[in-house]
């Protein structure tokens, strides 16, 4: 079986340290939101944005407000009909489609949570 996977950009939060909405920060020729969404779309096809409404995007507002990133992830898991959700934070504008496609392909196996050499 090949699992159906959707992509979800985690774009909630207040961006208090940044001073502006991270999703709208331009990196190169595109906003961070557009970069992450494009990478996810190349990897899995369907993409939703988790958090507040954003014009031009399919957005899924948090079911429970002001509860941090896990609220967005819980919303995606609750709302989707797909077998799995590949979540990427909006402040990862250099996520590579081929890396995301590889992670999505692992959905037939076990849940995947990548960590770095420090365990974070």
Image (cartoon, rainbow, N blue to C red):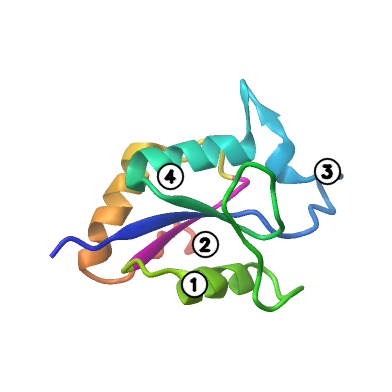
Residue 61 lies, with reference to residue 43, above or below; the image says below
Q: Quadrant of residue 14?
A: bottom right
Report which residue position mark 2 lands on.
Answer: 120
| Front-most of residues 66 and 57 | 57
Instruction: Give x and y (percent) for residue 66.
Output: 76, 73
Label 2: how many residues lie within 10 Å, few (<14), some (14-19) or many (20+)?
few
Report which residue position mark 4 lands on.
Answer: 40
Residue 76 lies, with reference to residue 59, above or below; the image says below
Q: Which quadrant does the N terminus fall into?
A: bottom left
* Of marks 3 and 2, the one in the foreground: 3
Is residue 112 visible from the viewing direction of this image? no
Query: Disc 2 versus disc 4: distance between alpha carbons?
Result: 22 Å
Q: Are marks 1 and 2 in contact (CB under 8 Å)?
A: no
Q: Residue 20 shows which numbered tag?
A: 3
Instruction: Give x and y (percent) for residue 119.
Output: 47, 64
Q: Which residue lies at the image location 30% right of the left edge and 55% below the top edge?
A: 104
Label 3: how many residues lie within 10 Å, few (<14), some (14-19) or many (20+)?
few
Query: Disc 4 versus disc 3: distance between alpha carbons?
Result: 23 Å
* Of marks 1 and 2, the one in the foreground: 1
Report which residue position mark 1 lands on.
Answer: 79
Relative to 33, 44 lies left or right:
left
* Of marks 1 and 3, the one in the foreground: 1
Assign a secondary structure to mark 4.
helix
Q: Are marks 4 and 3 in contact (CB under 8 Å)?
A: no
Find the magenta span and give its range.
Answer: 84-91
Q: Quadrant of residue 34?
A: top right
Whichever of labels 1 and 2 marks the residue nearer the N terminus, that label is: 1
Q: Residue 14 shows which numbered tag?
A: none
> Does the magenta run of residues contain 111?
no
Relative to 77, 45 lies left or right:
left
Instruction: Give x and y (percent) for residue 68.
Output: 69, 70
């Amino acid at each position: 079986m090949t699992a159906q996977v959707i992509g979800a950009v985690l774009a909630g939060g207040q961006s208090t340290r940044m001073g502006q909405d991270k999703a709208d920060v331009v990196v190169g020729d595109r906003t961070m939101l557009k970069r992450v969404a494009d990478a996810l779309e190349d990897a899995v096809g369907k993409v939703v944005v988790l958090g507040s409404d954003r014009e031009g995007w399919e957005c899924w507002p948090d079911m429970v407000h002001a509860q941090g990133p896990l609220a967005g992830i819980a919303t995606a898991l609750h709302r989707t009909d797909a077998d799995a959700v590949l979540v990427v934070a909006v402040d990862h504008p250099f996520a590579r489609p081929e890396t995301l496609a590889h992670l999505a392909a692992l959905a037939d196996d076990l849940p995947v949570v990548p960590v770095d050499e420090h365990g974070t």
